[in-house]
Image (tube, rainbow, N blue to C red):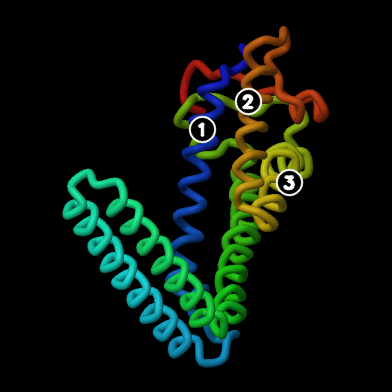
């Protein structure tokens, strides 16, 4: 019998968390240091950037407290409230403009660091998930726990196409370009799979149909 959407979804989430946790550990053990070494004087730059952000936050809080105090003193006086809001807006505009000037020298190197970190997670995820899925012959830990199984032509190439290329590859590419776009793409993909699995006779996703495979429930652990 074809597995339902939620069984498939929970097995995917479990495998995703398992692989992502491994990538996360390797990032803090090795990857982060390797990336930092690609950026000259990273520690000094990052420390200075943090100090600028801390100062900005303190100034922001100070201006906000001054505004709140002025509004309280205004005690409903519209003219005084308007003056307080005008002063607050002007101070925040000056603070934001100065902050942009202060952080400008750090934008390029730190942006490289964050981009390289995203690439590390994205590419690392595809590699590790690909190896994990193929080595397990599609019988991942998540599928075992949810008692579902990939059926059809389950040779390594077909498993890789089904579980990596058609499932994660495009999503990862979009995330590498835009995190927001990736989240929108993920939402669309989930809703699309939910519709196909719930409302079609075959209970298959598009990748299932393209590769003539299916995900079916099992009566016991395998």
Q: In the drawing, does residue 151 fall left or right of residue 30?
A: right
* C-alpha gap between disc 3 and disc 1: 20 Å
Q: Is residue 38 visible?
A: yes
Up-down relation of residue 169 to residue 201 (above or below): below
Task: Give residue 214's position: percent from left, percent from top.
Answer: 70, 23
Q: What residue appears at the point 61 percent right and 68 percent down from the top-left corner?
A: 115
In the rendered image, which residue does mark 2 sit on?
A: 191
What residue is drawn where x is 18% and y is 52%?
72
Q: Is residue 200 left or right of residue 10?
A: right
Assess disc 2: are there few (<14), some (14-19) or many (≥20) residues with their C-alpha within 10 Å of its C-alpha.
few
Of all residues, the one furthest to the top in this rendering is 201
Question: Mark 1, mark 2: which one is toward the viewer?
Answer: 2
In the rendered image, the residue lying farthest to the right is 210
List x then y, in percent, for residue 64.
29, 61
SS class, disc 2: helix
Give the labeled residue for mark 1. Answer: 11
- Of the two numbered discs 3 and 1 on the same chain, state the one appearing first in sequence: 1
- Picture coordinates of residue 46 (x, y %)? 45, 82
Residue at 39%, 78% in the rendered image: 50
Q: Residues within 10 Å of mark 1 (few under 14, many from 20)?
A: some
Whether tag 3 and tag 1 are in contact, CB under 8 A, the answer is no
Instruction: Tell me which corner region of the image, top left, top right, bottom left or bottom right, holds residue 192.
Output: top right
Q: Could you tell me which secondary element the residue under label 3 belongs to?
A: helix
Is residue 146 depicted above or below 14 in this figure? above
How many residues crowd around disc 3 within 10 Å: few (fewer than 14), some, or many (20 or more)? some
Q: Nearer the viewer, residue 89 or 54?
A: 89
Disc with the residue nearer the chain's start (2 vs 3) = 3
Q: Which residue is mark 3?
A: 170
Where residue 186 sits: x, y (%)? 62, 38
Q: Could you tell me how far apart the alpha carbons at marks 2 and 3 are, in whole angstroms?
A: 16 Å
Among numbered discs 1 and 2, the one appearing first in the sequence: 1
């Amino acid at each position: 019998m074809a597995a339902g959407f939620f069984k498939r979804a929970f097995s995917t989430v479990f495998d995703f968390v398992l692989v992502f946790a491994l990538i996360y550990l390797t990032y803090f053990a090795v990857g982060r240091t390797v990336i930092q070494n690609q950026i000259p004087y990273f520690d000094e730059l990052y420390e200075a950037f943090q100090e600028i952000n801390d100062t900005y936050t303190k100034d922001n809080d100070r201006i906000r407290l001054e505004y709140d105090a002025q509004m309280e003193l205004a005690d409903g006086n519209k003219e005084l409230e308007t003056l307080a809001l005008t002063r607050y807006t002007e101070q925040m505009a000056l603070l934001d403009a100065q902050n942009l000037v202060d952080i400008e020298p750090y934008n390029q190197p730190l942006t490289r660091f964050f981009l390289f970190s995203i690439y590390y997670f994205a590419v690392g995820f595809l590699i590790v998930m690909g190896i994990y899925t193929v080595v397990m012959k599609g019988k991942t830990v998540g599928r075992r726990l949810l008692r579902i199984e990939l059926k059809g032509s389950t040779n390594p190439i077909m498993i890789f196409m089904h579980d990596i290329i058609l499932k994660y590859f495009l999503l990862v590419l979009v995330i590498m370009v835009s995190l927001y776009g990736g989240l929108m793409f993920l939402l669309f993909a989930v809703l699309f799979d939910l519709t196909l699995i719930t409302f079609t006779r075959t209970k298959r996703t598009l990748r299932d149909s393209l590769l003539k495979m299916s995900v079916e429930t099992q009566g016991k652990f395998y």
